[in-house]
Amino acid sequence: MDRLSPTPLALDAGRPWPLGVHWDGQGLNIAVASTTAHAIELCLFDADGRRETHRGSLPGRTLDIWHGYLRADAGSTLGHPGQLYGLRAHGPWRPDRGHRFNPRKLLLDPYARQIVGDFDWGPEHFGHDGDHPLQPDPRDNAATALKARVVHDQFDWGDDRPPRTPLADTVLCELHVKGYTALHPGVLDALRGTYAGLAQPAVLRHLQDLGITAVSLLPVHQWLDELRLVGMGLTNYWGYNTLGFFCPAPRLAADPANARQEFRSMVKALHGAGIEVLLDVVFNHTAESDALGPTISWRGLDNAGSYRLPPEQRAAYDNYSGCGNTIDMRQPAMLRLVLDSLRFWVQEMHVDGFRFDLATALGRGQGGFERDGPFFQAIAQDPVLAPLLAAGKLIAEPWDLGPGGYQVGNFPRGWLEWNDSFRDTVRAFWLGGAVTRGQFAQALAGSSQRLQAARRGPSESVNYVISHDGFTLRDLVSFDFRHNEANGEQNRDGHGHNLSWNCGIEGDTDDPEVLRLRGRLQRALLATLLLSQGTPMLAAGDELGHTQQGNNNPYCQDNAITWIDWQQADEPLRRFTARLLALRRQWLPLRPSWYTGLADARGLHDLSWLRRGGGALNDWDWTQSASRVLGAFIGAPGRGQRPLLLLFNAEPADTGFVLPRGAWQPLLDTADDAVGPDTTAPVHGQFPLRARSVALLAGPAHPVPPPRTSA
């Protein structure tokens, strides 16, 4: 760094709002939150970010907000949009009390709209001495530290409108911006793997043809690759290590310097195709890691006011995220940061909703998870965010790694939740795990045992069999064991309990019988998911037969392991998935409200469960795992006036299923991916329910109720 001292800045008092650094047409208002700092300085840099040219203390303090105002210099770029800046915070160095102030470290504005530079993991970026962790490091890191750039831009949204898809019609697709288009033949090379690539017509057509109504994007907030991964030549591909809560990741942009506008253009294009955009957001921890991690922003500005610290050992961090630290949502400044970030993405970037990673951490109070805690209350009353809650656009991953962290079914009304119970139950039913017919029926019908008593609807269950975290659908039926050697952790990482089945051969094979079985199981799993009661979520690429070669934790694999290979796409599986979703749209077999089991004036029960002989399941039947055949008689489907039958046979042998009286039209038979109403005649008496298959049949216009006694 240039040894010349920076020129002193004379700052006016400014305002304590909005937080961050903002251009108002005449200058910059600066507002920074810190409960325990003694002083905060604004540091300005030259165009390449190497030399600190000016420095001045923020003169104002209102409650816990430090603030100042810099009038723009009409004769230079000083104080104008484009200005590079950082912060320095003065205060006590007392790790034992939770304070880690070190003014020799340049700090990133938590509200930065654009982050400039590459973090090089040099020892000068750590607030503590590497050999003596409880002592401050004396080196100044400003020359190579990350900087923020003042941003003031406009975007022509034109007639952009959020699709506002009703929850009953919502079909989520979880996808990675880069991995989805990195190999897409319909996307120009320069745009592959970027926001612009995702907005290309060929990609939009695929999503539309499939029947996807919303994409749930893996993290796009700017993130940092961990030191351990950098040392192994790997990256944090998934992005669950946030650095900038207001910054679209430039590594996902075709033009990194223009990531904000490119992201907006992507959202506008998706909206034009009728597809909503949800973001996977990581507010449970930051990229600063544990007590031995770098000092980048929050640690240096207000460590004790940013992170959860054990009362008995405040030099350490509560680690409910598994990533070294946990954001403390009990602190007003951090709660405000999260809310401000969410509002920013809705108002300025036109995002439609959010999926909250390890969301239990956001609801942790003094004694554990609080269903009515400050975060949930703040969302419920916020004029920007409350409409998203009412529309079912806020999704929780309902667990974290802390005590009492598993909270599936316990989030407030209106919140959707990832339902891993559905995932595990459905996998076990089809792939040979321990599960009863009663458990399978509960999962299929909205997991009422978890949600109904809390006055929550079945649509609040996000049903999925596959997510980014674990095997792909193809790998689920191709591998008994994880194969994560490429991750550099001796195959110890990732889940060991996958409830998968390789169908007799581990990995790839040319055996036609094994391939037929794997195809049939994939279709059965997809049908169970997409015809279930709840909000379904597909993992991108599963409709194409995407494989990760048995890697069930490819968080660090930014390569062909994770990128979807469109040239090798399973086209019959894609057509089958699209037809399944068309059937869901047409019939909505299991409606978005709870079933009662009561009969209407015709004597038809809204939902009843049948044995293969046509009689009702009795108490003993529900508890059995040996038999994997059952049927759902749906007297009140979500759409249409005709009753429906959903039939399941997860056993290895064909069977006959006795039908209620009348003519039943097959709409779907997953044993043959081409079977449908245009290819099959109506069936009377008994339906040939083939091994490891799902069938959907539409009944007569004037049906006779099935018998209520066992047959």
Image: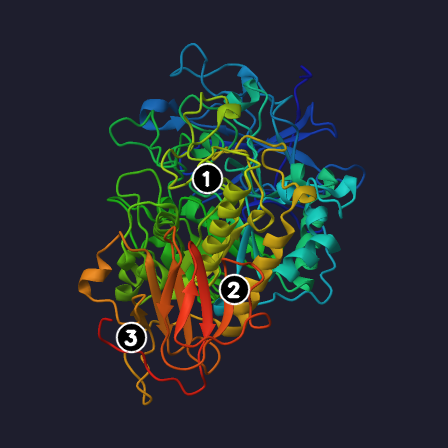
Q: Is residue 683 left or right of residue 499?
A: right
Circle 3 residue? 596
Left or right: residue 586 compared with residue 154: left
Mark 3 / mark 2, whichever is N-terminal: 2
Residue at the extreme right of the image, as rendered: 75
| Mark 3 touches mark 1? (CB < 8 Å) | no
Q: Which element carries disc 1, helix, strand or loop?
A: loop
Label 3 sits on a secondary structure element that is loop
Q: Between 495 and 83, which is closer to the camera in this rendering?
A: 495
Residue 199, horizontal then vertical, whole percent: 71, 52
Q: CA distance from mark 2 to mark 1?
A: 23 Å
Query: Residue type at mark 2?
Result: Thr
Q: Secondary structure at mark 2?
A: loop
Which of the 4 image quarters holds residue 417?
Answer: bottom left
Q: Which numbered dot is residue 470?
A: 1
Quadrant housing residue 278: bottom right
Image quadrant occupied by the C terminus? bottom left
Q: Is residue 366 visible?
A: yes
The numbered mark, 3 or 1, whose residue comes first in the sequence reads 1
**x, y percent for residue 617:** 25, 67
Residue 34 x, y percent position in the rendering: 45, 38
The residue where tag 2 is placed is 170
Q: Nearer the viewer, residue 241 or 60?
A: 241
Relative image position of residue 205 (x, y in whole percent):
70, 58
Count residues near mark 3 (Cα–Cα under 10 Å), then give few for <14, some for 14-19, many for 20+: few
Foreground of the two, 487 or 291: 487
Badge number at residue 244? none
Q: Amino acid at mark 1?
A: Gly
| Relative depth, front residue between 314 and 540 | 540
Residue drawn at x 49%, y 57% as measured from the top left: 671
Residue found at the very far top of the displayed protein? 131
Which corner quadrant holds the N terminus? top right
